[in-house]
Image (cartoon, helix red, strand yellow):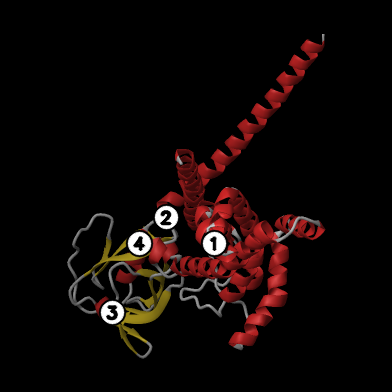
Amino acid sequence: MKYKKRKIADFFANFTTYISAFFSILLLGGIIIYILSNGASNLSWNFITSDYKETLNVVDVKATSRVYDDPEIEGTYFSEKYGVGLKDAKTVDGNPCVQISYLSVNSPFLTLNCKGGFYDAKIGENLDVLMGISEENTDVFASSKDGAQKFALALDNSVEVFYLHVIHGGGGIRGSLLTTLYLICLTLLFSLPLGVGAAIYLTLYAKEGKFKTIIMNMIDATSGVPSIIFGLVGMIVFIPFVGTISGRNVFSIFAGALTMTIILLPIIVKTASEAIKVVPSEYLSASLALGASKTQTIFKVVLPNALPGLITAVLLSIGRIIGESAALMFVLGTSIEDYPKLFNGSTTLSLHIWSLTQAEVPNFKAACAISIIILFVVFLMSISVKIIWYFYTKKRGAA
């Protein structure tokens, strides 16, 4: 009887486990499929290396008496009056646009009038708003929402275009990518010495007792504090602190790095402590017996043998920095900058996603493309950790 009850209990326990695992995998798989299907088409080298902010040129142009020959390029709608070919395309971040695909020799678009001089339109630039006058002295209007065909027709109907938007570039993530790299380098520069130093003290110097127990419990407790609380601390403490250095009490990458430092310290301390603990105590004893000081032993024996664990701490920290957003809103701000500076605000890749989804017209495709980059980097970090531990344990086993 007891055996049957136990068997039934085991069946329900296993069934619950399998069902939970199935739905977890299904949910995770659905999220990944959604991100890949929506963002993969946006991923390109231009998307990664282009500026986010577009260059807008407001120009005007008059038609000439010349009629230009249509090159008859597939997918291109040609304006015979202005000698320009237009096509329906997408911007770097995936939004529909009307793009210049062809320019005839001596086309008026090669010498557009703009404030303070002339502007030469280039193949690949986008056209947005057009306002002109027809031969019958009626208004002509077109926008990129109308499509390339109607835009080209509006040009042919205009004897003069007195207002035209020519847009160059925009939609890329180069600035946010640079901000993320700056933040990673600065944070590791601050957090690694502090975290590894604390791990060395707690593992090799601190005596067992209440003080050490309290410190370890506080580190564990700090690991569970929501990151948004650290962001609030960063806004109250680190922004004014950085302001005394830079003279500007504003959002900054430097303040963001200090905030991420206190977020990562518990992770680095715990990971480094475990890495130091797995170094055989015989190594320490042998080094001291040979006459080396404890400091020499730590830096020449203990840390080199604990290097795989320390690298693991670095990789985990990089993954956390890339994925963090809540805390950084308070110290970095949400303004996307193409040329980030250490003492100015900017956005990381994760904050760039937030900014795109909070816009008046959310750009989910570009957000998914950035998500693919973040997921790939985090996946790469996780695989790297496993590879490092595999070769380390294999080496130790061979020794």
Q: CA distance from mark 2 to mark 1?
A: 61 Å
Residue under numbered circle 3: 120
Secondary element under disc 4, as helix, strand or loop, is helix
Secondary element under disc 2, as helix, strand or loop, is helix
Q: Nearer the viewer, mark 2 or mark 1?
A: 1
User: Which residue is more in the foreground, 47 or 387?
Assistant: 387
Q: Nearer the viewer, mark 2 or mark 3?
A: 2
Which of the 4 image quarters holds residue 248? bottom right
Q: CA distance from mark 1 to mark 3?
A: 76 Å
**Label number found at residue 148:** 4
Type of amino acid under label 1: Gly
Type of amino acid under label 2: Asn
Mark closest to the chain's N terminus, 1 or 3? 3
Mark closest to the chain's N terminus, 2 or 1? 2
Mark closest to the chain's N terminus, 2 or 4? 2
Give residue 257's position: percent from left, percent from top. 59, 70
**Label number found at residue 341:** none
Residue under numbered circle 2: 42
Q: Residue furthest bottom?
A: 116
Q: Residue at x 17, y 66 (%)?
A: 69
Residues packed near mark 2 inside 10 Å, few (<14), some (14 to 19) or many (20 plus): many
Give residue 270's position: percent from left, percent from top. 65, 55
